[in-house]
Image (spheres, rainbow, N blue to C red):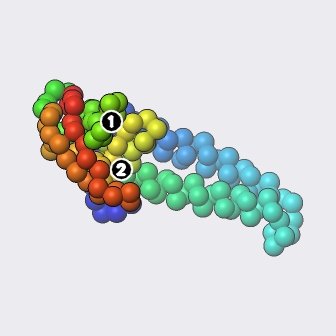
Amino acid sequence: MTDQQSFLTPEKFTELKHELDHLKTVRRKEVAESLEYARSLGDLSENAEYQEARDMQAAIEERITHLEKVIKEAKIVSHDKKGDIVVMGSTVTIVKDKEKDGRTYTMVGSEEANIHEHKLSYLSPLGEALMGKAKGDEFVFETPAGKQKYKVLKVE
């Protein structure tokens, strides 16, 4: 993660805290038991179970470090009031130029962005182009396929 502040919804913040707790209390213990078992098998230089357990331990510790940093530096954002301007937490419906169907996205921080859940990072090219826009605004942004033109249909 960069030195940029991480913006999280209260729900995502809670989810990350639960994941961190699970990794520290459950997964660490499971991996320690796997390591102990693998050591009991003898020769560590040719012990695949031992190597696998060590790799898993490294991955878990890396994730714990990442989550601790995100949680420590996170700014919790909630979008309680309806506004006319796209900000963090806004749900915005946009339509691409020359198309009929709109797309709805919720503006979130990069940690919880998930295009399949229609959660759009405010740091993505489309997210950056949307920030500060209001209902009725038209905007253009650059994509690998060239410039795309959109119109904001609704901001909640």
Residue 119 in view (yes/no): yes
Question: Residue 130, relative to residue 144: is it above or below?
Answer: above
Question: Residue 122, relative to residue 45: is it above or below?
Answer: above
- Left or right: where 40 falls relative to 117: right
Characterize the local packing of mark 1: few (<14), some (14-19) or many (20 or more) Cα atoms within 10 angstroms.
Answer: few
Question: Residue 58, relative to residue 20: is it above or below?
Answer: below
* The N terminus - image quarter: bottom left
Location of residue 11 in the rendering, given as x and y in whole percent from the top left corner: 37, 33
Q: Amino acid at mark 2?
A: Ser
When asked about the image quadrant of residue 69, the answer is bottom left
Disc on res. 110:
2
Label 1 SS: loop
Nearer to us in this view, 150 or 135: 150
Location of residue 21 in the rendering, given as x and y in whole percent from the top left corner: 49, 42
Nearer to us in this view, 141 or 24: 141
Residue that carries the numbered disc 1 in the rendered image: 99
Distance (Cα) linking label 2 and label 1: 28 Å
Characterize the local packing of mark 2: few (<14), some (14-19) or many (20 or more) Cα atoms within 10 angstroms.
Answer: some
Q: Amino acid at mark 1?
A: Glu
Nearer to us in this view, 31 or 88: 88
Q: Which of the marked residues, 2 or 1, is nearer the chain's N terminus? A: 1
Residue drawn at 26 percent across, 54 percent down: 141
- Left or right: where 127 falls relative to 55: left
Location of residue 34 in the rendering, given as x and y in whole percent from the top left corner: 74, 52
Residue drawn at 49 percent across, 53 percent down: 64
